[in-house]
Image: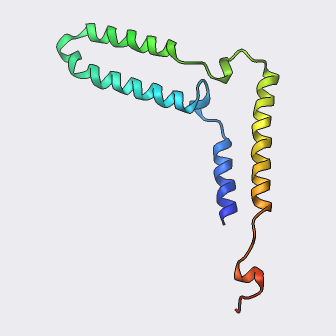
Amino acid sequence: MRRTLALTVVAAMTTSSMALASETLSQSAARIAHQVALETAAAPVAVAVGTKVAKKGERLRAEAAQAQAPGLQQSGMSKRNKILIYLGIGVGFAAAAYAIDHNVVDVTPSSLGKRKD
């Protein structure tokens, strides 16, 4: 049961996410938090001031978008290097899963022959 759950989680994590399309998950979370903070801070003032705040908010968003570090897709590395990186990650994960799975000591009553059905 645990093995099936672990493999299901791994399979779910291997699908490509939209968050990883241009940035890492932490960068994506930071960007979203920053956008929410800008929108909540600008909302009460926007009613009083009007378009000035909207222009300032757009300028701040543009500056924040330019300040973020690029992801692997915009790193300038060749396609071959990127494939090798992903292949190395996959081989490392497979080796870790194999080592964990084959070093488990099975001490359940049924495997020890002590179970009486």
Question: x and y percent of residue 91 in the render?
Answer: 80, 42
Q: Quadrant of the C terminus?
A: bottom right
In the figure, is residue 28 to the left or right of 5?
left
Question: x and y percent of residue 90 in the render?
Answer: 77, 41
Question: Which residue is outermost to the bottom?
Answer: 116
Displayed quadrant of residue 34:
top left
Q: How is the image coloured?
A: rainbow
Task: Please state which of residues 99 and 86 is positioned toward the viewer in this rendering.
Answer: 99
Tell me the residue at 26%/22% (across/down).
43
Q: Quadrant of the N terminus?
A: bottom right
Displayed quadrant of residue 58:
top left
Tell me the residue at 20%/11% (across/down).
49
Tell me the residue at 71%/92% (across/down).
116
Task: Please state which of residues 46 and 94 is positioned toward the viewer in this rendering.
Answer: 94
Question: Which residue is outermost to the left?
Answer: 48
In the figure, is residue 29 to the left or right of 103?
left
Measured along the vertical axis of the image, is residue 105 above or below residue 12? below
Measured along the vertical axis of the image, is residue 85 above or below residue 104? above
Measured along the vertical axis of the image, is residue 111 above or below residue 18? below
Question: x and y percent of residue 42 in the render?
Answer: 28, 19
Displayed quadrant of residue 39:
top left
Task: Please state which of residues 17 and 3 is positioned toward the viewer in this rendering.
Answer: 3
Tell me the residue at 60%/23% (across/down).
22
State how many labels appear: 0
